[in-house]
Amino acid sequence: MVVDTREHDIVVVGCGIAGLSAAVAAQEQGARVVVLERAPLEERGGNTRYTPARLRMKSATELSDDIVDYFAANAGGYLDPSLVHLTSEDSKNWPAIVRAMSFIDPEVVSTFVDEAPKALAWLGHYGIKIEAVPIPFQTVQPRFSPSGGGLAMIEALAEAFERKGGRIVYDTAALNLVQNGAGDVIGVQAIGPRNQRTEFRGRAVILACGGFQGNAEMLTRYIGPKALNLRVVARGSHYNQGEGIRMALNIGAAPCGDYGNWHASPMDPRSAQPEPQIEIYAYGILVNRHGQRFLDEAPGSIDAHRERIAREIFLEPDGIGYAIIDAKIDDIPYRQKLLRTEVPPITAPTLAGLAAKLNIPSDALERTVTEFNQGCGTGEFTPLKLDGLRTHGVTPPKSHWARPIVQPPFTAYPIISAIVFTFGGIKVNSRAQVLNIQGDVIPGLYAAGETMGTYYKSYVGATSVLKGMTFGRIAGRDAASRPSAQ
């Protein structure tokens, strides 16, 4: 093992929004920082590089009012009320079992809400401009995004970091955490090109290297054998191998977040584009490999239900579904916003011909469409808002935008459940310090971004990038103020 002899105060693992926010924030406090990045220079940034970076905000400076409610509704499973009620007290008075329990800490949520607007204002000093995103379809709340998306954030922060002497070591992945005799984390053992092993030392380590969506073994271990049918949503996700989570768990960190779940997105498996979402199913029907419908395609607004629908598709045979629509789709304004794929649809003049191209039973598809058509009611079809145009006597029902599928040519888009990121991670406190299984701080160890476990059951939409920048900044500042371990 070669020991890197350059002097560093902070070792950051990961070069996405969480890692770079941590690195720049620590550097601002005078710390000497090294960032370890698994990807090469031209692909640095992980998921952040490829995301449009939607932000759950009601204005360019204010978070949406519903964030706390959504986190509360997805705080964990059936939590023990005899323990949960203790969280109403100051966290210093929580017993160890509560501090280490797998649920989203309300103090972490309140810190997120308080600090996220400050983090956004801070990013503005590095030339990152937040803009409103026009959304023509009915949605839960407004959306904002940095101009240029996640890539612009990566380039701006990395440039500022390196301009001030910061060091990014590419093609290098973390293997193990290094501790001193007292249990303080004082460095990282890493692997670089040609299997070169190097140890990087510092007075603190910040884990900001994402989840484990790029790791087939961890996906199978935590999600199950059907994880084989998942595909990452963008190229950057392949670099998220879960080493930050594994290393922390190996030294006794407490787990947090829903390990058997993930942020899901309905996507075209044929596409090579990042985030090739297919959401046109809301205006048609979804069938499985047997030609059968299996869910309500439009239970409410598209963005509020896309994740649940993607997970339902995952449970179907081979983890795939097909959106079936007809020529009337041409009267949907902005329909291309629901088709973020560069691959043309599969079309045929008849349903039987379409079924043959999809390799599903033609008699089953024709029967499914006939039954659906017979259940469609009358009323005004209003595509840009929930119209209540529902089916009657059809199982499963369809709650909105239910029109007969009768006008050729008939069209299909294959859809699988893409994995954007995993939910399972490491337990931290409001200072982004990692907690151990006794609920105590592991000195010198921090986590931010998706390495930090936050989500349960359902993703709180458009909060991931916000969380990464917010807790990355918190971790960097706190780590920089930490004295050197003996």
Image (cartoon, helix red, strand yellow):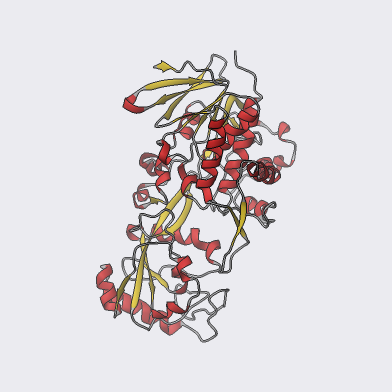
Position above or below: 22 against 261: above
| Residue 159 x, y percent position in the rendering | 53, 36
Picture quadrant of residue 3: top left
Question: What residue is shown at x 35% (from left), y 23% (from top)?
Answer: 196
Position above or below: 292 against 51: below
Quadrant where the image shows the C terminus: top right
* Residue 241 seen in the current view: no
Position above or below: 361 against 72: below
| Residue 36 x, y percent position in the rendering | 47, 30
| Residue 180 x, y percent position in the rendering | 53, 15
Q: Nearer the viewer, residue 150 or 178?
A: 150
Question: What residue is shown at x 38% (from left), y 22% (from top)?
Answer: 197
Report the side of 34 relative to 358 (left or right).
right
| Residue 304 x, y percent position in the rendering | 55, 62
Position above or below: 479 against 285: above
Q: Nearer the viewer, residue 68 or 260?
A: 68
Quadrant where the image shows the N terminus: top left
Residue at the far front: name it. 163
Q: Nearer the viewer, residue 391 or 235?
A: 235
